[in-house]
């Protein structure tokens, strides 16, 4: 799914953002259902067709689409252990990504990486299970583009917890010093696993830290796709023009637990009760309808997203597992 920045005659960017959010949500809804297969009645993370942890990005979709709507395949994106929404918005092949999540040979890494280690060189996307790890590689990619005379940019997604990691500050310092064309996107969902931002972070907003590294810092409230699109557009314009890096912190909402199976008990009950009303997809749908977009067009995008998710799941289920011997492939001694 090409972004508006990369395809003439594509959907208007707002419809594209709605479509990309739907694709992520539809796929993750199915993954959540399948994840519990074989794990109940006594929850066993090692069982079922998708063993291990599973981190869903339900509720955080606006962060991805508002940024990636401006990007080209040649721009580099690094993401977190909660990567599906960003991967889909960047144009990662959904069938191959889903097969990777299922550990199948047709996956992006031949089933050897899993959902926290998604790599797609065709669109320059990668992610990592290590908190904040993508920040330094993004600066490196940005500097490579700059030194080669290209106007490509790099974008590093991280959480508000990741903004407390040392590698983020080292990367931000070098980015500011070298005027690297990189944008740090901090997805502030208020919780680092079960620890609230108020209990872990010395400043109310991580965007305020940008001043220490000689770059602009912007805070986007309300998980608003249109506001994210505007803020990201300016930051990416600056980066392409050689004006250096930016930090954008986005107020977003993790509507699910930290991982599938996490019951969110550490969050106050009133906060948990409020979460469904903050779902950005129905809210954005209401906005589009109120501003004159056709209901039939939105329904077409909704059906397309459901169909794409069904096709990706079917592809993954039908694919073969790697052999035990293949576990030793691509290993460097």
Image: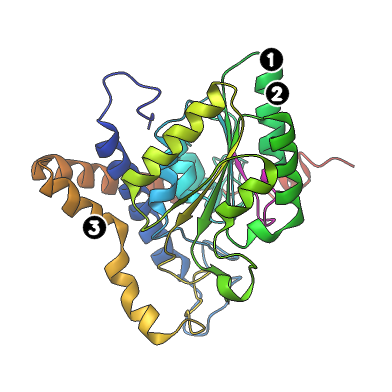
Label 2 Cα neighbours within 10 Å, binned few <14 / some 14-19 / many ≥20: some
Residue located beneath label 3 in the image? 283
> From this viewpoint, is residue 224 visible?
yes
* Identity of the residue drawn at 27% across and 69% down: 277
State which region is magenta: 125-135
Looking at this view, name the residue that lies furthest to the top: 149
* Identity of the residue drawn at 24% across and 52% down: 284
For the residues labelled 2 and 3, say whether their Cβ atoms are less than 8 Å apart: no
Q: Earlier in the sequence, mark 2 or mark 3?
A: 2
Label 1 Cα neighbours within 10 Å, binned few <14 / some 14-19 / many ≥20: few
Measuring from the top left, give residue 99's x and y in whole percent.
51, 46
Label 3 Cα neighbours within 10 Å, binned few <14 / some 14-19 / many ≥20: few
Report the Cα–Cα distance between label 2 and label 3: 39 Å
* Identity of the residue drawn at 37% across and 32% down: 1
Residue located beneath label 2 in the image? 144
Helix, strand or loop for disc 3: helix
Residue located beneath label 1 in the image? 148
Helix, strand or loop for disc 2: helix
Specify whether residue 229 is painted magenta.
no
Report the Cα–Cα distance between label 1 and label 3: 42 Å
Report the Cα–Cα distance between label 1 and label 2: 6 Å
Instruction: Say which quarter of the image contains residue 51.
Output: bottom right
Q: Is residue 198 above or below residue 169?
A: below
Q: Is residue 280 above or below residue 118?
A: below
Pick the front one: 317 or 30: 30
Q: Is residue 163 above or below residue 21?
A: below
Specify whether residue 130 is painted magenta.
yes
Measuring from the top left, give residue 186's x and y in whole percent.
55, 52
> From this viewpoint, is residue 115 visible?
no
Please identify the quadrant where the C terminus is shown. Answer: top right
Measuring from the top left, give residue 136's x and y in whole percent.
72, 41
Pick the front one: 176 or 192: 176
């Amino acid at each position: 799914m090409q972004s508006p920045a990369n395809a003439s005659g594509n959907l208007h960017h707002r419809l594209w953002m709605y479509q990309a959010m739907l694709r992520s949500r539809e796929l993750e809804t199915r993954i959540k259902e399948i994840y519990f297969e074989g794990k109940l009645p006594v929850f066993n993370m090692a069982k079922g067709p998708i063993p291990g942890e599973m981190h869903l990005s339900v509720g955080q979709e606006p962060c991805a689409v508002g940024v990636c709507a401006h990007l080209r395949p040649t721009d580099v994106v690094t993401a977190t252990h909660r990567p599906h929404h960003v991967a889909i918005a960047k144009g990662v092949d959904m069938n191959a990504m889903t097969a990777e999540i299922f550990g199948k040979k047709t996956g992006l890494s031949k089933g050897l990486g899993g959902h926290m280690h998604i790599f797609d060189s065709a669109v320059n996307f990668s992610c990592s299970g290590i908190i904040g790890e993508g920040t330094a590689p993004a600066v490196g990619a940005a500097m490579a583009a700059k030194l080669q005379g290209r106007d490509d940019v790099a974008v590093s997604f991280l959480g508000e917890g990741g903004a407390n990691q040392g590698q983020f500050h080292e990367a931000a310092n070098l980015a500011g010093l070298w005027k690297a064309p990189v944008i740090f996107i901090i997805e502030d969902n208020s919780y680092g696993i079960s620890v609230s931002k108020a209990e872990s972070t010395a400043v109310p907003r991580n965007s305020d830290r940008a001043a220490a590294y000689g770059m602009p810092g912007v805070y986007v409230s309300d998980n608003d796709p249109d506001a994210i699109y505007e803020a990201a557009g300016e930051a990416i314009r600056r980066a392409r023009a050689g004006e250096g890096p930016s930090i954008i912190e986005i107020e977003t909402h993790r509507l699910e637990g930290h991982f599938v199976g996490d019951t969110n008990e550490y969050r106050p009950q009133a906060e948990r009760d409020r979460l469904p009303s903050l779902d950005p997809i129905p809210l954005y749908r209401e906005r589009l309808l109120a501003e004159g977009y056709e209901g039939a067009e939105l329904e077409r995008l909704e059906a397309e997203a459901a169909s794409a998710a069904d096709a990706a799941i079917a592809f993954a289920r039908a694919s073969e597992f790697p052999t035990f011997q293949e576990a030793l492939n691509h290993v460097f001694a």
